[in-house]
Amino acid sequence: MLDRVLPRIEWHSLLFGVLAIVAGLASVVIVEYVPDVNYLLLTVGAAVVALLIVQRVEWGLLVLVFTTYIRFSSVMRTYHGAPPTIHFLILLIVVGIFIRWIFRGRQPSGWERVALLLGSYGLVNALSLFFAVNYSAARHGVVNLMEDVLLTISVVILLQTSGALRRVIWMLVAAGIFLGTLSVYQYLTGTFSENYGGFAQVEYANIVGRTSDYRIGGPSGSPNFFAQAMIVLVPLALDRMWNEKSIWLRVLAGWGVAVSALTVIFTFSRGGFLALSCVLILLMIVRPPRLTVLPATLAVCLVLVQFLPAKYIDRLLTLTDLFPNSNADIRNEGSFRGHLSENIVAWMMFVEHPILGVGTDQYEHLYLNYSERLGIDPRSQDRVAHNVYLEIAAEHGVVGFGVFCAILWIMFRGLWLAREDFLAVGKPDKARIAIVFGVAMIGYLLCGMFIGLAYANTFWMLVGIALAIPQIARRELDIYRQLNASSNSKFAIAKR
């Protein structure tokens, strides 16, 4: 009798039930022994999310995308004393993937090539452990990269269908709405002393000349990095505003466009302005909007213009100091002088260590040694490179830079091929998403010319999405061809 009943039990349901019992017992213990209500709510919420992810790991992808983009783990750890939730979430997703494979027979697919590609880059980083001046920093950097590689592979494994792709895009837009709304409200109300749980930090810094003001920094606290993250969301939200069938979703996407673009402005990031301008121009070239949506787009632009800060244009005009015919000396502008020194130092490191560079996360610790020899930057403090490409070349040499460029080449080529495959199966909306995501990544990488790769998990998550899109398109093209072949075969049989 027992043998007849047990086979009918779905093992994933049994596991879910066991986990539910464990969570219930844990809740009893927490209520009894944990006095802080906030920690109690956070723990219960985490337990619920964990159970949902184990039951359906695809939901974990959406949670991972949203929380990674808003830097939830970092904010919780810094401002609320919570453990690093990103580690727990990635581990939980990996467990969920294995459970789905073992108990449901859904073997992970499409990750092998990505693992080989990113593993090669990880190997170059790991070689730093043999010659890095600061071994502790190198080890920390390698561990972080391995975590990012695992994150990227998890995204590729879970992002398998065009429906999941659309939900992921909306998760990114939702992250932009959340962060952008907080930041815009903070700036317009002048509530700079309130960081809104750590998700709306600010920096009081020089704007132009002798004028200083508050610059929006978001969950990272760095205006330039925050601008880089928000630039990605502008074209994605614009595409949804132009193409969603539901009027309410279009309005929501329009809100995402407005607050994301305003946030870029309120960061006062000059590199962010240049990157955003290039993104919008490129978007209009490769993906021009229909005439029916132009009025709404122009209306959003007119609204944005009304909120330009008084000193924003003055700050942008300092970019003309870089022109050869300018009368200004950029050595008299502190920001330009510092960035120039940091970039030259990166080049000096690359020239002296051209094969494998100085090692993972070594630039910051070696900067002063090179800066003193250069004599441009009077600051006596460790600095990071303000150019991600020079930083990679300095730390990983020709080998690491070559592998990184190969990753970018495969990513962009794949997105273009995905566009053609989606068009071939009659899915123009997904083809637009593929090309717009490529434009968004160009915006992110353009910002990389002015800042380093300090918050790498966001970048590698975006890379994971970009690498998953071609696989989705290829899979749907294969299904389309199989259906056509089957239909033709049945027609031939019927004809005979």
Image (tube, rainbow, N blue to C red):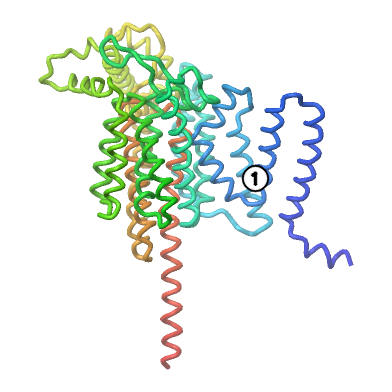
Name the image quarter holding residue 245. Answer: bottom left
The residue lying at 22 percent from left, 11 percent from top is 331
Residue identifier under label 1: 95
Name the quarter where the N terminus is drawn.
Answer: bottom right
Amino acid type at mark 1:
Val
Instruction: Please name whichever residue, 338 or 219, is drawn nearer the observer in this view of the structure.
Output: 219
Instruction: Please name whichever residue, 312 or 436, is drawn nearer the observer in this view of the structure.
Output: 312
In the figure, is residue 469 to the left or right of 417? right
In the figure, is residue 240 to the left or right of 305? right
The residue lying at 70 percent from left, 36 percent from top is 44
Task: Indicate the secondary structure of the residue bearing disc 1.
Answer: helix
Name the quarter where the C terminus is drawn.
Answer: bottom left
The image shows residue 350 at horizontal and vertical percentages of: 32, 23
Task: Tell which residue pokes out farthest to the right in this image.
Answer: 1
In the figure, is residue 171 to the left or right of 210? right
Name the image quarter holding residue 418. Answer: bottom left
Q: Residues within 10 Å of mark 1 (few under 14, many from 20)?
A: some
The image shows residue 110 at horizontal and vertical percentages of: 49, 53
- Number of callouts in the render? 1
The residue lying at 46 percent from left, 52 percent from top is 165
The image shows residue 407 at horizontal and vertical percentages of: 38, 42
